[in-house]
Amino acid sequence: MGDWGLTETSMDNYEISILSHVAMSPSRHNNLMSAYSLPSSKSSYSVISAFCTEDNIPQCISYINQELGSLGLAAHIQADPPGRASLNAAPALNAMYELLQIHRRSMNNVEELEKEQLKKTSTLEHMQTSNSRLKDQLELSIREKSGLHETERQLQLKLKTLQSCLKTEKDEVQKLQSIIASRASQYSHDAKRKEREAAKLKERLSQLLVDRKDKKLAIEMLNSVGRSDGKRSHWKTAKATASREAEMYKSLLSDYEASQRALMLENAELQKVLQQMKKEMMHILSPCPPLNRGGSAEESQELGDSDREERSAETSRETLDQSCEHAREQLTNSIRQQWRKLRNHVQKLDNQASLVQNQPPSNAEVIPLETHEHEVERMRLEVQQCKEFIHAQQQLLQQQLNTSFDDETAALLNGCYTLEEKERLKEEWRLFDEQKRNFEKERKNFTEAAIRLGREKRAFEEDRAAWLKHQFLSMTPFADRMRSSSSDGQSALSVKSEPEIRTSSSKAPPVKSSAYTTFSTPKSSKSAAVPSTIDVCRTLRLIPDYRESSATEDEESWLKSKSKVCSSDLSIFSLDEDKNPLT
Amino acid sequence: MNFSEVFKQSNQLCKVSPDGKYLATCVQYRLVIRDVNTLQILNLYTCLDQISHMEWSSDSLFILCAMYKRALVQVWSLEQPDWHCKIDEGSIGLVSSRWSPDGRHILNTTEFHLRITVWSLCTKAVSYIKYPKACQKGLDFSRDGCYMALAERRDCKDYVSIFVCDDWHLLRHFETETQDLSGLEWSPNGCVLAVWESCLEYKMSLYSLDGRLLSTYSAYEWSLGIKSVSWSPSSQFLAIGSFDEKVRILNHITWKKIAQFEHPAIIDNTKTVYKEIEKRPAVSSDEMSLHDITVASSLFSTQSKYDISPLPVQIPVVKPDPDRANPKIGVSALAFSSDSRYIATKNGGFQVHSLNWHCSGDSLILIGKDQLCLCYMDADQNNE
């Protein structure tokens, strides 16, 4: 038994070691399974073979029954028959079944336990990792905290130092202020003291000086001067002082009155202005149907009604007494009211305008605006067109003025433009030529006539000279000869002058008598040609005298001409005398 | 423009009589009276010492010649050249001397401002006024010559006394709200007295004729304050020029500021700026900017002309020495034109001694150190 006991213990140890082996390797499921599935046949075999042999069957049976009983199983193994090696099957099977059950149960338990253990190990792992992580975090935060602590400490230190500085500064300031105050008081005290001293000194000085002075008046004047206003001075009496006071107050009062008047005027002006403003504001706010449109009309009507009522009441009140405080307040209040209304009105209008801008243009109020805009656009277009037109015109004009073409086309163009003018000019030239020709003709006639007349005059002069000579000589024995020739000359003159005056230039020089020939020869050669102007002038000068003598009354003119002729007699006589030897 | 010959004068004492007929000049100790039209010497008076101050009386009949060193005042008459008058203040000294508005009293301020002595030429009487204040402008006569305002200081407090000029009777005596009164000026209508503080504080107080405080005005604190003051001829405006280079205009109804003009270094917002360009090689250009003026300059020898500078114009600014007292910054001269339409201001350290408007209000005379400039306003320009 001792060996059996030993073997038991060794068996126990072995079982324990197996179990512990199984327990020690929880993570290895395979091992477990392998452990569970089939116990290593060798080891279990060896255990079973060591436990029960042929000899110790009843002991084994009793032992097993003991064990079963200790396990709490009801089944018992019985030997059948007792004392023999074989067993009763049913209880043995029951025992085995129960043992299997127990085993299964324990296996299940083991499984469960192992599962739980797994779980617990995983959670443990998890916990450990998180633990480690948290530890790290904790370390970090501890470090941070320590750092922050440091900074806080430093800042606090700083704060403390600053506060202490501030305190010291404040103390200093206070100290200085107190010093200043004390010094100021000191200085003022000293200043006052010094001033008093100075005053005392002055007093003393003045005393000394005044006492020292000699008593005579220190003013020397030749004579007293009259007062500036010419009046005598007055005695100083109480009445005088009172009158002075009165004058002073009078002047003050007059000044105050003047300023008050000015202020009243200003006040009245301002009130008028305010009244005006109020009226105008009311007028603006009051309803005028053509001006207001849409919803605002109703509101303004309401306003207008209320305004009118207010207006009548207020104006009556205000006109009563403008200087009354009550009235003034009322006026200002009413102005404020009106202003508020006006402001609201304007705001509403603004809102309406903004609304209208957003709304589609179907609203009645917008159409006028649109049409207005159309109109404006149209007018703008018109203006633009007109401007373009003007611009084009200007350009054309410029082109005309600054022709940069070649000469031919320029000339042509110029010719085109001046054609009419040229035509006109031609006309005029023609007319001018005609007139010129006529003038020439007439001049020619004129000059010829003048020449003729000159000649005739000469002839006449000669005749007359001859006649006079004849007359003169008729007084002498040689009178007869002269008479005949002069009478011929005279008759020739009288006969010839008339037809010559009448007829035209065609019968001019050749008809003249021989008496003229001597004089007329230079003229006759030139007679066909146009006479020179000098000759014409000469003859013209001569002609009026001659014509006068022939046209006017015979005797007077004759006398005149005679007197003229007498004056020229000598020359004629001289000529005639010259002539005589010639003829 | 024609120029007469140059006459000698001393101490810049050269004044035309109020009626415009005579010209008085001082040469050392002689007083020369000339006729204004012909410049012929009408009278020649000899004083006892060098003349420090000369003034015409308001009716142009007398001339006062003060000799401060000798504490003497001599008065000469135009009508009677042999009339003479001598006032001797004696050892009490003489610091300033002036006529009263009626032309018959002389006010002498003694040395150390101990007192003001009022000498009457009509009666040879003397009056004394005690405790006058030694300040920039402590005495002012109203324009109609009725009242005289005098600043006094007793017991470290400022007072103002108002005297009636007829008989030197004290009308009112009141304490002012100032710490250290620096000046006072009557309004042209004689009803308001403007009283201002020294430059350490900006404070303008306005008192009515009977001594009531009407209003005070203070533009800012702590910086240097009022430098110059001018009433408009209509008494409607009071212009205050201060050390901050601004001019503030108060109105006479509310005594509040109605306008403020600045003098920036860069001018950008006026219509035209005229810059004087001198053709003297030695001196650099003297720039002045006044709002909206045209210029006809008259100089003896140096050629200078005024060009229209294009905006913006930079004015050369001389930074004042901060350690010295009475720095040369700020608006130091103000002048209203006679119709109160324009105001001319001088800002900074420019060399302009005085600004005076012509009585028609159309032209302005600037008198500089060496130069005189006449400025004509165009009728169609307006100022800001």
Image: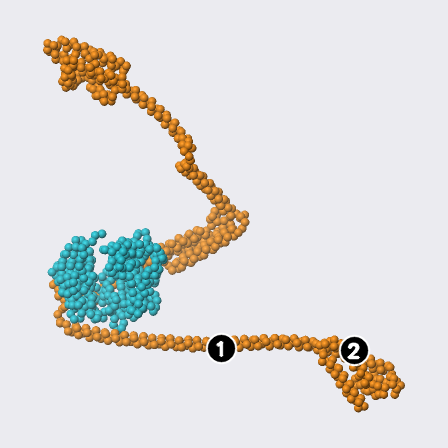
Question: Disc 1: which chain?
Answer: A
Residue at 31 percent of width and 66 percent of height = B320
Instruction: Check disc 2 and give the amino acid type.
Output: Leu
Q: Is residue A456 above or below residue A138?
A: above
Residues indicated by labels 2 and 1 sit on the same polypeptide chain: yes
Q: Give the residue at mark 1.
A: A153
The residue lying at 14 percent from left, 56 percent from top is B42
Determine the residue positioned at 50% across, 44% down: A374
The quadrant where residue A60 appears = bottom right
Viewer-proximal residue, B196 or B306? B306
Rendered image: mark on residue A38: 2
Kindly identify the amino acid type of the residue bearing the numbered disc 1: Arg
Q: Which chain can be seen in orange?
A: A
- Residue A35 seen by the camera: yes
- In space, the residues marked 2 and 1 are separated at their CA atoms by 72 Å
Q: Indicate which disc, 2 or 1, sits on the residue closer to the N terminus.
A: 2
Is label 2 or label 1 in front? 2
Chain letter behind tag 2? A
Q: Between residues A41 and A434, which one lies in front from this camera angle?
A: A41
What residue lies at 40% left-to-right and 32% top-to-bottom?
A411
The colour applied to the residues of chain B in this rendering is cyan
